[in-house]
Image (tube, helix red, strand yellow):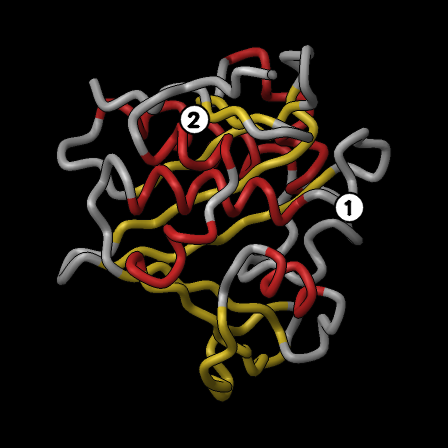
Amino acid sequence: MNHLPELHGERLWLREMRATDLAPFERIHTHRVLTRYLGIDRMDARQAQDAFAQCLAQPYTHPRRRHTLAVCAPGDTTMVGTMALLVEEYGRNAMLTGLVLLPDAPVRGHGHEAGRLLMAYGFGRLGLHRIWAGHRVDHVRMREVMLAAGLRPEATLRELFHTQGAWHDVTTYAALAHEWIPQASRAERAVLNGGEALVHA
C-alpha cells in the first residue's frame, strides 16, 4: 500500500480518505456553489459515489499518482474539505488541485496551509522538484491563497478546461523545491523530514 502519513499543520491537518467520509465528499461534489470553480462539472449522487470509490482506491495503486486527502480541523477527525496532489508521469513534477472547504468548516481562511503541507510532503518524501497549481482567471480570491502557499505566478493557459458549458482560462503558479524549502514553517519542516505531527512547544 502507498498510504500517506497524517500531515499536521498549525491550523489544520490532512489524512487519507476513509469510508466514513462519503457524506461530506458527496456534499462537496454535488453542491452547485462549491463546484463552481473546479475543473470538473457538478456531479449527481451516483457520480460522486463513484468518484469517492476511486479516491479510496488510490493508496492501492502502483505507482501512486493521485493523492486525494481529507482536510480536518485540529483535534477532530471529521472531514471538512479536500485537497489533492497529482504526480505527473514525467520528470519530478506534480500539481496541487481540488482545494474545497465546506462553508461551515472551522478551518476556512486557512486553505493555503493544506497546500503547503502537501508541498512539504511532495518536496520531502516524494523528492519532487517542481509543484504547480492553477485557478480560473475569474476566481480572483485564489490568487492570495496561491501566494500564501509559496507559489509564484507563471502564466495564463487559455481555455484549459470546459465546465458549465464554457471554456475557461487558468492562471498558473509554481514552486521549486530549492526555493520553497528554506521558507517552510516548523510544522512543514517536520513533514519534509519525514515526521507526521507538529509538536507544540
Up-down relation of residue 147 to residue 30 (above or below):
below
Label 2 sits on a secondary structure element that is helix
In which quarter of the view is residue 130 placed? Answer: bottom left
Q: Which residue is mark 1?
A: 109
Question: How many numbered discs?
Answer: 2
Q: Residues within 10 Å of mark 2 (few under 14, many from 20)?
A: some
Quadrant of the rendered image containing residue 61: top left
Q: Residues within 10 Å of mark 1 (few under 14, many from 20)?
A: few
Of the 4 image quadrants, the one containing the C terminus is: top right
- Along the viewing direction, whichever of 111 and 89 lies nearer the viewer: 111
Element class at badge 1: loop
Query: Which quadrant: the N terminus?
Result: top left
User: Looking at the rendered structure, which numbered label has been put on residue 170?
Assistant: none
Q: Is residue 149 left or right of residue 24?
A: left
Q: Position of residue 165 (x, y in %)?
A: 64, 75
Which residue position holds label 2? 53
Considering depth in this image, is 49 or 158 the residue closer to the camera?
158
Q: Is 31 situated left or right of 81 in this image?
A: right
Amino acid at the residue labelled 1: Gly
Q: Position of residue 9 (x, y in %)?
A: 57, 29
Q: Give how far across and how far down residue 64 sits, in percent.
A: 22, 36
Q: Are marks 1 and 2 in contact (CB under 8 Å)?
A: no
User: Label 2 amino acid?
Assistant: Ala
Picture coordinates of residue 124, whole percent (x, y): 28, 39
